[in-house]
Amino acid sequence: MAQTKKAAAKTKAPKAPKPHALDIPVPPRAKLDPDTQAYFAKCDEKLGYVPNVLASYSFDAKKLRGFSEMYNELMLAPSGLSKLEREMIAVAVSSINHCYYCLTAHGAAVRALSGDPKLGEQMVMNYRVADLTPKMRAALDFAAKLTESPDKMVEADRAALRKAGWSDRDIWDIAATASFFNMSNRMAAAIEMMPNDEYHNAAR
Amino acid sequence: MAQTKKAAAKTKAPKAPKPHALDIPVPPRAKLDPDTQAYFAKCDEKLGYVPNVLASYSFDAKKLRGFSEMYNELMLAPSGLSKLEREMIAVAVSSINHCYYCLTAHGAAVRALSGDPKLGEQMVMNYRVADLTPKMRAALDFAAKLTESPDKMVEADRAALRKAGWSDRDIWDIAATASFFNMSNRMAAAIEMMPNDEYHNAAR
Amino acid sequence: MAQTKKAAAKTKAPKAPKPHALDIPVPPRAKLDPDTQAYFAKCDEKLGYVPNVLASYSFDAKKLRGFSEMYNELMLAPSGLSKLEREMIAVAVSSINHCYYCLTAHGAAVRALSGDPKLGEQMVMNYRVADLTPKMRAALDFAAKLTESPDKMVEADRAALRKAGWSDRDIWDIAATASFFNMSNRMAAAIEMMPNDEYHNAAR
Amino acid sequence: MAQTKKAAAKTKAPKAPKPHALDIPVPPRAKLDPDTQAYFAKCDEKLGYVPNVLASYSFDAKKLRGFSEMYNELMLAPSGLSKLEREMIAVAVSSINHCYYCLTAHGAAVRALSGDPKLGEQMVMNYRVADLTPKMRAALDFAAKLTESPDKMVEADRAALRKAGWSDRDIWDIAATASFFNMSNRMAAAIEMMPNDEYHNAAR
Amino acid sequence: MAQTKKAAAKTKAPKAPKPHALDIPVPPRAKLDPDTQAYFAKCDEKLGYVPNVLASYSFDAKKLRGFSEMYNELMLAPSGLSKLEREMIAVAVSSINHCYYCLTAHGAAVRALSGDPKLGEQMVMNYRVADLTPKMRAALDFAAKLTESPDKMVEADRAALRKAGWSDRDIWDIAATASFFNMSNRMAAAIEMMPNDEYHNAAR
Amino acid sequence: MAQTKKAAAKTKAPKAPKPHALDIPVPPRAKLDPDTQAYFAKCDEKLGYVPNVLASYSFDAKKLRGFSEMYNELMLAPSGLSKLEREMIAVAVSSINHCYYCLTAHGAAVRALSGDPKLGEQMVMNYRVADLTPKMRAALDFAAKLTESPDKMVEADRAALRKAGWSDRDIWDIAATASFFNMSNRMAAAIEMMPNDEYHNAAR
């Protein structure tokens, strides 16, 4: 009988766990606007799931679009920083802020993009132990200071990036990435956003 | 003769001061895409100037659109929080981060929306001295903790907001506003973004 | 009848709002000792009002005299620092401590002495954005470190001031000013001292 | 011959060690104004020496008078707090700020006034380990918060003192004492003021 | 030929990478005293490798014994806390201190002992997101406060543990575990101790 | 009769005060294992008392041995650092952590080993005021940073020690001493361990 029960369970659509602690239900797929449905279908296809951050924002199509356009432009658009470098900044910032969601999701991205699981762990735990180029190290030091004491940023901080080989246009992207994750880390903390389980084993 | 000089000055195109410390020039208006031109024309009409944050992002139309859509949705869309309440959160967060750009621009917004210049100053200096409802005070206390120690947010922090009278949907907006300005404050600090002079005297 | 009431109200001496949160009433002018009465009359004449910090101390003539002698010597006596430079230190320190009273009162003083309202705002918000001489910047950096981590002051901090062009006698005055406002900021915070409304619009 | 040398040494005026790190010489006694001479003579008589803080300020009679009047009023005038209680606050604050001068001088005062050397050490090291009345403990907790985060003082902090048995007039004195030592600690740190050797063994 | 090379390589003793940044070589096994040789052989047998922390200490048999006796007593001896609970404290403390070595090694231990890889990640990233009993949560909150502000521990902190169901003997073990990892985290940070690669994939 | 009572009292074995705040009684000497009895007898002989830290651990012979072996190896074994230098590090670390037990016990050790009571006080209060060799100052600066921000230790910190004249083997001992007291300080804080009264007057 237990077996029958189990078999039955398999026929039911799995109920997604709540992606955060607020009482703002994730709308069923069928109720989403066509754009969002298409976006989520693409997620399913590419990743096998819809990241909980997107599910969380999906109660309001405009908020979802605002967030994802900014995010996609930041992390995926052409830049003097590779996608991996941007993900490394994302994780180093999230480590300082101890953001479970972002460390899980973007730690997986660093593992995947680098093919180096240890590098992902190092960004999660303490970027200072990683064996990096001085140029990349300078970017992470800038991101860390910007995270911890934004009030103390001065011209010397930008000069250090230039000296390490980054252009002014690159500095914009380093700054924008570090700043964005200081937002995302806080949003996730404020509502206790939980990452999809799939991230944990990805790219180990 | 002084008058002549003044008249002459008016015929010259005023050269906008650099809005930030990076060597990423603001494109001339004529070179902007039509959407951005229309957006900036609307700023000129409504405010008399284009806020430097928008000018700063205008080197890349997609980045500008991502930023402004997220911003407009956050600060202007219907919400359980009034526009003034959202601006108060923006300024209280910016005060903790000592962000010159946001304190100047959004301090002016608090003065304008409240008709109470003193309230604007209090948000800039220390929100704890303002004579607020316990409900609004709870929102600012939540925003302050989220700014200073995002790693320590717990269910009790959300419970305190609910007890003060905020709905879960309101908590999303409080969290989103505080989080967004933790991004903007850092972006402004990283590139030393300077506010338009017009803000200083506005709504005094 | 409402008009009559209003007219009547005008004949009454306006009751000053409480200058702080403690139940220590400000004595009526007539009950003050002659020295204090003369001092306050001079304030009325020069400023148009008695600063609330003085009203707060007036319950005890000796405490008032101790405070004002030290204050006047510090801020008004001949010094290698101009009055404006001393006020700038006062405001930069008060910004770190988020002191509403001192930011309001001394922010107004920076505006008045400099004739540059923006400079006043910059000291209130974050002195690092202001366009200052390296010499003045060094003084503010010293004052900021002294405020945030007095335990870590070392000879190198004094050496930096000397290198920037300050004499040892000037260092005394920089130190004394920064130290004094670390006292005043805390006294104001402890008793929630409220600044006179007049400061807000002064020298805009 | 050694004896002769020693006798000779006694005839020479002992040269006082420099009381701080700035090049602002302590004027010889004979050059001081009569009031200061009288004040220092009284110190010699009562303590056997002139405290280095007074020697440091003696280069300017007005600064010395401003400082000492404020200090004497604060620590010696009638108050709802005993002199010992005020000294305990002074030392607890100086412990947080790690001020060598004040911990040495006022640690000795706690030992002397209490007749309990261990209490003096506890105030120097960590007031939380001392066996105090809840009333005194509340005063020190208030002083500690005022020292560490003046920006976060709120009505609840004053309410806690009232509940512990302090009057509003007492709160003034607790606040004034804690605030004053936040000034003195920083002045001493800024100029590396050194305490007289006599304090170390006093009242052990 | 490549295969021959590879085969040849297998016949060579693999050279262990340096376990830390100091120039204190790890002695070859044959030079270790018999006790250490036996201890390391047991590590090889049980774990498949000698943890780098033990290799690091092996330059001095007494230091190695002192460290490992204290460690083994702490983490393996009978206790009111399970081994998993002790490892969770170890990782939560190491997360605050951002210790790469301990997060890697003890994160793996939490995964192994709990059979719940996600729990291991949560301890590494932010213990506050984990779904724990109030009793275990209280232990981690105590450990976190002890790590961040040991100077502020008071009787109320111990009372909270007792109220959550811990005995005084348990409090000793909670305190001892949290304290020990505040030592180990710093030793690892000071010499940049690197964890064995084997930890990364263990118990995923 | 009072005298009789007093005389009677003298015949009773004095009951040792509780060495800490937990309900874990110190076993009577006769119940301790022979090794511990011998160790404590040696303490009595050498010091005149058993340090409370040892009494505290004596409820479990293995824990006591683990702690004392590690401690003795650290503080008494041959090293490139003198015993005084190790004690100075112990006290400087304990000062940052405001640990009453360690400041009392090891402050006395600095006084005894140096014959310079003032040096002991300076380590307790703020090591930066002491007149030290650049080499010793570098060691204390390293220990302070390791105590306050272990996550930020980098190669440059070790390089500074080497430049100041310390060998890599010395760096191990500096790191180990600073790390150990970060453990001991927290253990003492967690259980409110109280130092023996004898320390207060020792070596003044």
Image (cartoon, coloured by chain):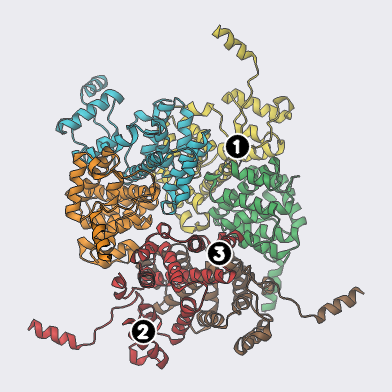
Chain colours: A green, B yellow, C cyan, D orange, E brown, F red
B178 w.r.t. E43: above or below: above
Q: Which of the 4 image quadrants contains residue F129?
A: bottom left
Chain under callout 2: F
Residue name at image x 66 percent, y 78 percent: A2
- The quadrant of the image that shows the C terminus of chain A is bottom right
> Residue E96, how many percent across, how many down?
53, 63
Residue tagged 1: B72
Disc 1 on helix, strand or loop?
helix
Q: Nearer the viewer, mark 2 or mark 1?
A: 2
Q: Tell me the CA gap for discs 2 and 3.
A: 36 Å
Q: Can marks 3 and 1 be said to lie on one chain?
A: no
Q: Is residue F123 left or right of residue D163?
A: right
Q: Amino acid at mark 3?
A: Gly
Instruction: Please rate how many residues cluster around mark 1, counting C-alpha atoms within 10 Å: few if below 14, some from 14 to 19, many from 20.
Output: few
- The numbered mark at residue F43 is 2
Q: Is residue F28 left or right of residue D7?
A: right
Sequence-first tag of 2 and 3: 2
Chain under callout 1: B
Q: Nearer the viewer, mark 3 or mark 1?
A: 3
Residue name at image x 51 percent, y 82 percent: E73
Q: Is residue E66 visible?
A: yes
Residue tagged 3: F165
Disc 2 on helix, strand or loop?
helix
Disc 3 on helix, strand or loop?
loop
D196 w.r.t. A161: above or below: below
- The quadrant of the image that shows the N terminus of chain A is bottom right
Find out whether the residues at labels 3 and 1 contact each other: C-beta distance under 8 Å.
no
Chain under callout 3: F
> Residue B129, how many percent across, how many down?
37, 41
Q: Nearer the viewer, mark 2 or mark 3?
A: 3
Instruction: Please rate how many residues cluster around mark 2, counting C-alpha atoms within 10 Å: few if below 14, some from 14 to 19, many from 20.
Output: some
Q: Amino acid at mark 2?
A: Cys
